[in-house]
Image: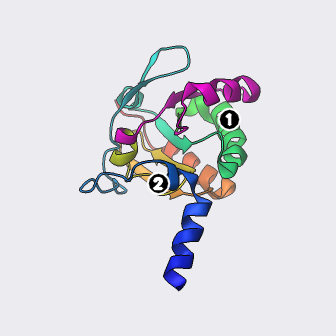
Amino acid sequence: MLLRAFAVALVAMCPLLASQTPPQLGKPAPRLGQPAPDFTLTDSAGSPVKLSAYKGKVVLLDFWATWCGGCKVEIPWYVEFQNKYRNNGLAAIGVSMDDDGWKSVKPFLEEHKLNYAVVIGNQDLASRYGGLPSLPMTLLIGRDGKIAESHAGMVDKDAFEKKIKALLQESPLK
């Protein structure tokens, strides 16, 4: 009975789990220190965003959705981090996991004025990142292209900013 209650609560808390197909088996989430799975997706202007093109920068990779309350809390923090640390080598990329894609995301972007690239994710990308057990899910990728931090759920803003600053202190790749 307790297990059933837990499962019902989990589905109720995470519409992403209830509305999308489960991640493919055999594709475990990348671990800290492993290269971040590359992708190329288009932004709202139709321009390609390729993760590997950001090598040499610290990348804040945020998986989010317009319906996600925690995501809406974090996004202004990421806008702030992008403003503060862009010139030091930070690049934020938002990956929306909204089922209806740009239909929901474009109005959200018009209202919230994000200052970083936003793309629409898909099930293949989600599976390469471990199926995204919850949203938000945010990763920090070091200048070397390897995952330095992975956090499911809302981050602690101050602790996350300290991690960003530490990664930015590392020498840029030559």
* 10 Å crowding of disc 1: few (<14), some (14-19), many (20+): some
User: Which quadrant does the C terminus fall into?
Assistant: top left
- Give the side of residue 112 with respect to residue 138, left or right: right
Q: Are marks 2 and 1 in contact (CB under 8 Å)?
A: no
Q: Is residue 153 visible?
A: yes
**Pointer 2 residue:** 149
**Badge 1 element:** helix
Tell me the residue at 39%/31% (across/down).
51
Dot 2 or dot 1, earlier in sequence: 1
Q: How is the rendered protein coloured?
A: rainbow
Q: Over which residues does the magenta segment extend?
A: 97-124
Which kind of residue does numbered mark 1 sit on? Val
Image vertical order of residue 52 relative to residue 128, above or below: above
Q: How far is disc 2 from disc 1 in space, using C-alphas?
A: 19 Å
How many neighbours does mark 2 have within 10 angstroms: few (below 14), some (14-19), or many (20 or more)?
A: some
Residue at position x 42%, y 26% in the image: 41
Q: Which mark is residue 79?
A: 1
Answer yes or no: is residue 144 visible. Answer: no
Splitting the image into 4 quarters, where does residue 35 fall? Answer: top left
Question: Residue 82 magenta-drawn?
Answer: no
Question: Residue 40 occupies which quadrant of the picture?
Answer: top left
The residue positioned farthest toward the bottom in the image shown: 1
Residue 162 is situated, as x and y percent measured from the top left of the image, at: 61, 53
Across and down, in percent, residue 112 comes to 74, 30
Identify the residue at image location x=47%, y=54%.
149
Q: How many marks?
A: 2
Q: Give the image quarter of residue 145.
A: top left
Who is closer to the viewer here, 151 or 144? Answer: 151
